[in-house]
Amino acid sequence: MDTPKVPVAIVGPGHIGTDLLVKLQRSDVLDLRYVAGIVESEGLTRAREAGVEASAGGVDWLLAQDPLPRIVFEATSAKAHAANAPRYEAAGIRAVDLTPAHLGPMVCPAVNGDAHLDAMNVSMITCGGQATIPMVAAVSRVTPVPYAEIVASISSRSAGPGTRANIDEFTHTTGGAVAEVGGADRGKAIIVLNPVEPPMIMRDTVYCMIGADADRAAITASVHDMVLRVQEYVPGYTLRAEPQFDEPADEWGGHARVAVFLEVKGNGDHLPPYAGNLDIMTAAAARIGELMARAELGVPA
Amino acid sequence: MRTALRNDVRIIDTTLRDGSHAMAHRFTETQVRDTVRALDAAGIEWIEVSHGDGVGGSSFNYGFSGTDEMTLIAAAREEARTAKIAVLLVPGIGTVDDLKRAHDAGAEMVRVATHCTEADVSPQHFAAARDLGMETVGFLMMAHRTDPANLAKQARIMVDAGCQCPYVTDSAGALLMHEARERFEALLAEVGDEALVGYHGHQNLSMGVANSVIAYETGVRSIDGSLCALGAGSGNSPTEVLAAVFDRLGIDAGVDAGLLLDAAEDVVRPYLNRWPKMDRNAVVQGWAGVYSSFLLHAERAGERYKVPAHEILRRCGELGYVGGQEDMIIDVAITLAAERDDA
């Protein structure tokens, strides 16, 4: 007998939604039943070709389906999600939010994936957050981190108009999440767009301020362990080098520093492999959806 | 409508911003006050003050500010009698919140800087600046990395977003004279009727002043300089040299060249840790087209990982790294060290 699956839907059939479709169709606990858009599009066509019911009727159409989805993955815009979220909740449907709306608690599967499995709405933070917060958490679970700073470099081709028009939103949200979810006292985030051709694979650097006498071997071990956890859902998540420790400096208030250099290569499901920033969002969202579904079905992860 | 010019050309002095790179972001309040007083007395209209990477730039990645930049901006504002204070803002590093703080501290102009092909990350910041009533400049950085036609399109994006003066920003000091001229002409043709066009030079290939003259000849009317060339790489077009050259050309920049020479010699030189010069590392930056601010970071990484800084810089050029990617310098140094150990 097949394991029962939880019916789910994607709202927003753009490139992110389509990449997510490929990932959800591989799941053994999620049953992707519906894809909703607001205009006929290539994304809806691709969904139908993949055997999923798809409509340009938007959320009205989705909420008229039987059975209703138990979980909706929202890949529209912050504004659209803010409008849709109360309707999902009223229908008893949980939302995994890939937009910058940030209505629910911020989740990163490798760090706090189990913390909000009963929430009606969870936020996937930002691409840079998904890539770097696990490393901040890997350090902060070993030693206090008074300050953490992340630098996300992404290819210009992978930065959509929404990101570009509101780049401050990335800086604020990611910096806040580095502290709140990563476990640093203070966080700062920087994003750089690079137009080089062929496009560069997403790169992330994580700097953590640490005590002069912090246990460096334990930090290194914790970082390696956390990389393995992220690789469970993003196989192309790798360290470029061993964590680098710099000796205490006056300009760092007498603290030392550890720097972690990451490369995030996407799975190439629908989006190209260089767009690791987009892949880690869809992969993390799929992972959270699976964790929610397993909790609902009582199936161990 | 185009900003009215007070003189034939507007010189914006960036000693206290681009110079922040060469000073490892350790400017003191006293140095800022002394420099502003001297520039103001010499007739400079705009003085840029902020962390080298713009407001909000104080960080592990670029270096922490020795003195909070808002303190420095406020001190500069207090010292200036006729000059006005400008700040740099690089979207992705600084935010509108940082801009508001700078405005509160006394800044009246913002220069919003993006890589030369990424102007569409700037409209949010131009809109905020115009709401604050600030004068606006747009920096199209690493201008050698795209062709003149595309650079002009990017300038158009900025102007449409509220930028009053897009700049050909030669961050790597890589533009040869004909390349600079083509870019000036392209921008002037695209936006010259409604905006001023500017030029920001670096001396890595010794072109800053020559390109400034070409800039003026083509119609560029906002030109950057730094006293003693104090800036990233081998520094900027020296303000005091620009003043002397424009004086010889009979171009009224509204400044006293003699007082600027005094300011460079008597105020700035005594506090220099290093006088930016065309040494091997800096020339490689112009030659390989590398962001000038990478210089000190490459020297530090070179020392830390025992690899030559000029090789790090050259590799950064090959890989096409852009402004802001200072973390990649460490990555490149680690890679070069590993290649050496494998050999």
Image: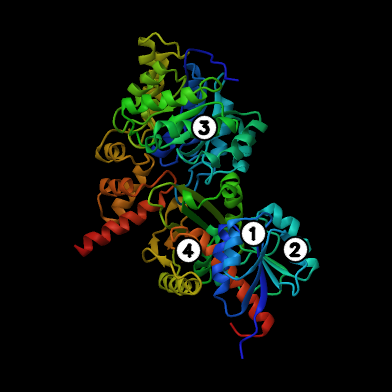
Q: Classify mark 3: residues with Cα within 10 Å, few (<14), some (14-19) or many (20+).
A: many
- Camera-side mark, 3 or 4: 3
Asked if marks 3 and 4 fall on the same chain, the answer is no
Is residue B335 in view? yes
Asked if marks 3 and 2 fall on the same chain, the answer is no
The percent position of residue B340, horizontal first and vertical second, equals 22, 59
Alpha carbon separation for disc pair 1 and 3: 34 Å
Q: Which residue is mark 2?
A: A61
Disc 1 residue type (three-letter)? Gly
Q: Which residue is mark 3?
A: B138
Query: Tag 4's secondary structure?
Result: loop
Q: Chain of mark 1?
A: A
Disc 3 residue type (three-letter)? Gly
For residue A156, above or below residue B169: below
- Camera-side mark, 1 or 3: 1
Query: Tag 2's secondary structure?
Result: helix
- Taking depth in this image into account, of B302 and A166 the one nearest to the observer is A166
Q: Chain of mark 4?
A: A
The percent position of residue A167, horizontal first and vertical second, equals 57, 47
Residue A211 marker: 4
Query: Tag 1's secondary structure?
Result: loop
Which one is earlier in the sequence, the residue at label 2 or at label 4? 2
